[in-house]
Image: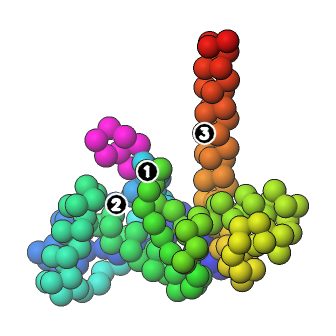
Amino acid sequence: MTPARWPGGYAAVGAFGQAAAEAFDLVGVAGTTRIDGVARRTTMSYMSHPLSVRLNDATIARLGRHAQRMHIAPRTLAQRYVEEGLRMDEHPLIRFAEGPAGRRARLVGTGKDVWEVIATVRDNGGDAAEAARYLEIPLGFVQAAITYYGAYQDEIDQWIEANEQEAAEAGAAWSAGQAAVH
């Protein structure tokens, strides 16, 4: 059973010793994060399942600095690192990238998000080879995206839907502007 299908969420990192217990205690993390009043999508959502691990002081300090720069709780960042690390182990051609809309799965070295590749495969009637030709990337990368999609379909479908909605809104705004100037 893949992690995406675990009922109730994902296993996540819990308290890292007495000194950091409060800072790193597990709590549920919603599917969006609000930073400066802006809702940002996250790659995953979590349910808490305690897991205690020991990390050295330098690692805890680095985690804290990274979390502070990102304006998120250290426990949330630790949960994300564990989940994404597992996903990258299971899907070696996938890495994660931050962007204006949130964190998303990408194909290594291509500049392509997984959702973009899957949308292109769909646009080409499910033909992975034709999608690879259109995107000008090796077929193996398209196949890697399809494999990732099989494990995390709901997540990728949300990205595709959000993009389609944004495109429709932009088209409507352009049409309204054209009607206003004519």
Label 1 vs label 2, nearer the camera: 1
Of callouts 1 and 2, which one flags the residue occurring earlier in the amino acid sequence? 2
Residue shown at 52% from the left, 81% from the top: 88
Classify mark 2: residues with Cα within 10 Å, few (<14), some (14-19) or many (20+). some
Residue 65 or residue 57, whichever sits in front: 65
Task: Tell me the tag on residue 100.
Answer: 1
Per the image, label 3 sits on a secondary structure element best described as helix
Q: Amino acid at mark 3?
A: Glu
Task: Tell me the tag on residue 166.
Answer: 3
Residue shown at 39% from the left, 58% from the top: 28
Side (left or right) of 20 relative to 84: left
Image x and y of residue 85, in percent: 45, 80
Residues at marks 3 and 1, CA–CA distance in whole angstroms: 13 Å
Residue shown at 62% from the left, 13% from the top: 181
37 within the magenta span: yes
Is there CB contact under 8 Å for labels 1 and 2?
Answer: no
Q: Amino acid at mark 1?
A: Pro
Residue shown at 34% from the left, 60% from the top: 27
Q: Which secondary structure type mostly characterizes the magenta part of the structure?
A: strand
Residues at marks 1 and 2, CA–CA distance in whole angstroms: 25 Å
Image x and y of residue 52, in percent: 30, 80
Image x and y of residue 154, in percent: 65, 58
From this viewpoint, is residue 50 visible? no
Which residue range is magenta in the image? Answer: 33-39
